[in-house]
Amino acid sequence: MIQSEALSLLEWSRLCQHLSTFAATKLGAIAARQLPLPTRQAESERLLAETAEALQIDQHPPGLKFAGIQDIGDALERAERQGLLQPAELLDIATTLAGARQLRRAIDGFEADELPTLSQLIAPLRTYPELEQDIHYCIDDRGKVTDRATPKLGGIREQLKHQRSEIYQKLNHILQQHSNAIQEAVITQRGDRFVIPVKAPQKDAISGIVHDASTSGATLYIEPNSIVPMGNRLRQLQRQEQVEEEAICRALTAKVAEIHDDLEDLLRIVTVLDLASARARYSEWLGANAPRFVTDTEQTTLRRLRHPLLVWQQRHEQGSQVVPVDVIVNPRTRVVAITGPNTGGKTVTLKTLGLAALMAKAGLYIPAKEPVEIPWFDQILADIGDEQSIEQSLSTFSGHIKRISRILAAVQPAQREESAMASAPSLSTQTAEESHQPPADSSNADTDSSGAEPIPPRSNALVLLDEVGAGTDPSEGSALAIALLRYLADHARFTVATTHYGELKALKYEDDRFENASVEFDDVSLSPTYRLLWGIPGRSNALTIAHRLGLDEAIVAAAQNQIGLSHQQDVNQVIAGLEAQRKQQEQKADAAARLLAETEKLHREVSRKAHFLEERERTLKQQQEQAVQAAIADARKDIAQVIRRLQQGEPTAQDAQKATDAVNQIAAQHQPHSTPKPKPGFKPQAGDRVRIPSLGQTAEVLADPDADGKLMVRFGLMKLTVSLEEIESLQGEKAELPKAKVAPPPLPAPPPPAPAIRTSKNTFDLRGMRVTEAEGKLEDAIARAQGPIWIIHGHGTGKLRRGVHDYLKRHPQIQKFEAAEQADGGTGVTVAYP
């Protein structure tokens, strides 16, 4: 009861409604709106694992697609009870089987260790393709029984077609014969009988049965007597058609009933997948992060925590900006008292924390900055009321007390059960993990401050109390609030309470299990900032606000004297100093965070470039190694040929010399050509002998090189001006070039992209398939495509081609598509470019 009240107070149903909008199926939406809360931590961890894996799949398009999944639960129940399924219901079952198989294929596309939870979930999934094929053979895409379902049905429909044709011919003949008596030359139906409109005064011109009349009575709809036997025969054939269709549906229904349990499991698995996908998409939309459940000895960390319902309101309903709060709680802390002004955000903080605990429990990510660390609670209990009204009556106080009593009653049974478990010898060996409670020697068995007997085991509950002790005399309400919070510190894992009572601020200094927090208040604008400050109690602002708003100073001074404010003002000054120090620390922390972010960005960029250079060097080495190995292989082949020639006949010394020369020549061809480094210091001068490799000549230098690196040389009777780059010494040394004239060699042009080539792997034949079957195969083909794909659909009626083109137009990964070249099939083949 109290758990349901807490869910209502925290508006959990609204969050579930928001989650349901991210579901892809009707079943998933229903499951999201009725989102169950696990009773064990292991279940929550499994749900979080499902969410993480669904998010991982969505990051690899096309992700999880739920096309074709229908709510077939009622149909399965009726089939089990030997009812008759209609063709449309059977078609829904077939499309659901196809959709489930598509989901399994998407998950099977990953390694099992990448998606361990979802892989285990779909392991028992059976999709019965043979049943799907039987249904599609008998039921068309419009949910009608096909002529080919049975030869008998085909024959009946052929007779029906012939009978209708005869009726139309007969009626047309009557219309022509009695055109003067006809109101309008049309053939229509009344009920299942064919009639013609006859003018009322001319009704005797055409003998027959009157089935209907117009509103004015001027037209009578008559079935001529000559076609009455034809109409009767038509009705008999229609009844035979109906009986045969029912027989076909009954046979298919029997096949469905045989695998009822497997289809129920399939529906459950698909719903779980849709729910996991919805949680992943909703979490991503919130900008949320995965939580980690902490133990009693670990700190609770929720930085920049946002209220998910306010985020929805901001984005969908133009609400105000959501102010995040930080919730960082020491593992020793059991009670947090939040103080501050009204409308300052205390209640919102309570609800945000409660929803965060519920979201983690239900497998949802929490809208907070990483790391997200929160305890797993057995219960989330709340007493949150609207304290904004100026009317505080006994009934309001009574309502709070009754709800708090129910909270304490919910906490106490857990204590007694834990105590009994601890005292039972047969359960003394139960581990903390199995019971989901801390071990007996942990902080869950604290002793009180006086060193008396240990306190009974604490209930693993989160308790949220809004304006604790309000609604009655302040002195009594304050005393009651202190006693209640001390009791909860002993008996509940974690309690957060909002209050206006200043006496609660002092609990922190008496018991280290208590902590203070306050909502920040702007003294200048006289308004709350909605920021939560930890470790600092809220200041008393009533008289300050009254003075700034213009209340007579004498009245304010009298009020100060009345309550002895000198001591309280000292406390407020201390709190103000603490707040100022906190602001300075926050500014420094923000600056450090920005510097850290810039450093991380620079580190990522440097790492990326280093990785790129390493990859390029690895690629070049691999190419060089391949070239060397190819050269060695070629040389070995050439040497083997020389050896075979040498082995033929009696080898002579001359043959051996020829073989040696051939091997040397092969070595010269295949050894890498290393360009010798030019020896510094070679400067051609007048009278030196040099070589001109481009001409294959040796020349004499006639004059020293000029500033541009040009010099005059002579060979034979010719004189020629050459550059230093064109000559070398007789020993092969290159000339030293002027540094200013050296230009870097041009980069080689990148090779042109290789043209797309059609192969058996990128060609997909869809001929003979239905549009729905073709779409499933196309989805697979596009997901695995490494380039263009050729889709063979043929000409036929053109329905398959239109279906393929419509699907390609809608697909987000297809950039364009066109008809293939004439040699590749022309308009009977489509080329799609992902």
Image: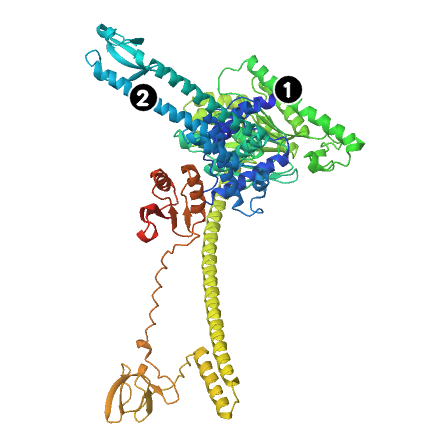
Where is residue 668? Give x, y as percent: 44, 82
Count of marks placed on residues: 2
Disc 1 residue crowd, few under 14, some 14–19, many 20+, Cα 10 Å: few
Residue 691, compared with residue 581, is above or below; it is: below
Q: What residue is shown with label 1?
A: 405
Which residue appears farthest toward the left when viewing the image?
180
The type of residue carrying mark 2 is Glu
Q: Secondary structure at mark 1?
A: helix
Q: In the image shown, does 258 or 200 lie closer to the viewer?
A: 200
Where is residue 656? Give x, y as percent: 50, 89
Query: For the residues marked 1 and 2, what is the alpha-carbon distance in whole angstroms?
Result: 84 Å
Q: Is residue 76 left or right of residue 812?
A: right
Where is residue 644? Give x, y as percent: 51, 81
Q: In the image shown, does 33 or 83 lie closer to the viewer?
A: 83
Q: Earlier along the polypeptide chain: callout 1 or callout 2?
A: 2
Whether the residues at callouts 1 and 2 have beta carbons within 8 Å, the answer is no
Residue 670, compared with residue 595, is above or below; it is: below
Where is residue 832? Give x, y as percent: 36, 47
Q: Quadrant of residue 676?
A: bottom left
Q: In the image shown, does 190 or 686 lie closer to the viewer?
A: 190
The type of residue carrying mark 1 is Ser
Residue 277, compared with residue 7, is above or below; it is: below
Disc 2 residue crowd, few under 14, some 14–19, many 20+, Cα 10 Å: some
| Residue 110 numbered tag | none
Which residue is painted at 56% across and 20% down in the image?
Answer: 470
Instruction: Inspect this view and state whether residue 575 appears.
Output: no
Q: Nearer the viewer, mark 1 or mark 2?
A: 2
Residue 756, compared with residue 312, is above or below; it is: below
Instruction: Inspect this view and state whether residue 681 appears.
Output: yes
Q: Is residue 212 left or right of residue 483?
A: left
Q: What residue is shown with label 2?
A: 166
